[in-house]
Image (cartoon, rainbow, N blue to C red):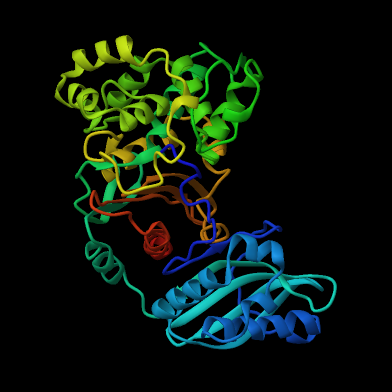
Amino acid sequence: MPRSRPAISAVATAIAAMLAMPAPVAAQATPQTTANHASASAALTQRADDVVALLNGGGDPDALFAPAFLAQVPAERMRAISAQIVQQYGRAERVTGIAPRDARSGTIDIATERGTLHILIGVAADPPHRIETLLVTGAELSGDTMDAVTAEIRALPGTASMVVARLGDGPPQPMAGIEPDRAMAIGSAFKLFILAELDRQVRAGQRHWADVVPLDRRSAPSGILQAWPAGTPMTLQTLATLMISISDNTATDTLLHIAGRENVERMMTTIGVAAAPRNRPLLSTLELFALKAAPQPAYDAWRNADEAGRRRLLARDYAALDAAQLPADLLAGPPSRIDTLEWFASPMDLARTMDWLRREGSETARAILAVNPGGPALRGRFAYVGYKGGSEPGVIDLTWLLRDREGAWFVVTGAWNNPAAAVDEARFLGLMTRVATLVQGS
């Protein structure tokens, strides 16, 4: 969904099962349990113990963390994060292992009352060796089951829907789910449809990933291209990578224009998206922004029009939009018109979309999907992780394409909508990551 930050960009938010806390050092680590305290530096060992105390409500975040870290995750937020982790996993008990990467960083394993946390930690070189990086790269909940986590998802306020599907030669086969055919608002996950159509055109020889096009339009964040100079030359592959990996809205609208709105709409039908009629005409991010901000009469005109009427409205009233005229805080408040102004698909629609990209898509398209895995927790657990998410106030969607070490393919996808209040994105990421983790060995 277009917004001031990409969905699940791990901007200092707690999650009930797994947590990504940003810091100056970006890194991934494979969860492991290695009792190797002897080779860890004294500073790293001390800070590992300090994290145990911090999780249990002790310690002083202002003394433990580097100023740059605290600028992103203030002490009050850190306390809230710790409380949510303890609520999910129980009190932290002890450090059971440290796997150093070097003298100042490594992966620590912390036993809790109900599970284990795997946390990447990095400390400053100079005393007092404040923490510069803290990233939960994995977690296990003792005795977790698919029934338990789906029960938690069902209990969320509003409406939630999800599916775990095994992929093979035929259609996706649901293994677990909650109303998997229910159409939900999916935010920026609709960009998968654009990727699929663009990839089809490249494979058909109509375009090439290396084709260069000028940046001739701009939307509003999320993304970076809205701040780039007009006319900047961009390859299609770069635009597609930005569209998927950081949900860049300007890249999205550029590619929708290049691929063709009606071509993308046809691709939805080709894939088998049952909710395709709700997405016609398929809105660009800027068009959706403008309709979100529209006065009530303009919104009513859109809501009451049929497909042909909506196409006429776009041509008449929304053909010369200027992103600079949009309210800066457009999506900073409560949910706005998410039942009517959104992109829609069911979990099974998105399972079919990811399966199409698996079977019919190119290696380039799958590489683009793998740039951002939707958090660090699944890398290292699966041989391949492709991801696209989407969110705005009241909406979150998380969709993964996964291949396990034995070569079996799965889709894990879920959405949570609540028109009455913002959804807890971090909580949903935690729940859906637990679902994905439980797919292993299925």
The image quadrant where one finds the C terminus is bottom left
Instruction: Tell me if residue 63 comes above or below residue 354 in the rendering.
Output: below
Q: In terms of depth relative to the viewer, which is nearer, 58 or 162?
A: 58
Q: Is residue 206 visible?
A: yes
Q: Which quarter shows the N terminus?
A: top left
Is residue 442 in view?
no
> Who is closer to the viewer here, 436 or 405?
436
**Image height of 15 relative to 297, above or below:** below
Q: Residue furthest right?
A: 126
Q: Position of residue 397 (x, y in %)?
A: 36, 47
Q: Position of residue 417 (x, y in %)?
A: 27, 50
Q: Position of residue 38 (x, y in %)?
A: 78, 87
In the figure, is residue 104 to the left or right of 407?
A: right
Residue at left offset 66%, top offset 19%: 232
> Relative to 233, is 45 above or below?
below
Question: Residue sitting at 49 percent across and 31 percent down?
Answer: 220
Question: Is 314 or 273 nearer to us in this picture?
Answer: 314
Give percent across and percent down for residue 216: 56, 15
Which quadrant holds residue 316?
A: top left
The image quadrant of residue 73 is bottom right
Residue shown at 70% from the left, 61% from the top: 68
In the image, farthest residue toward the bottom:
93
Total count of labels: 0
Q: Is residue 238 above or below residue 83?
A: above
* Towards the viewer: 249 or 189: 249
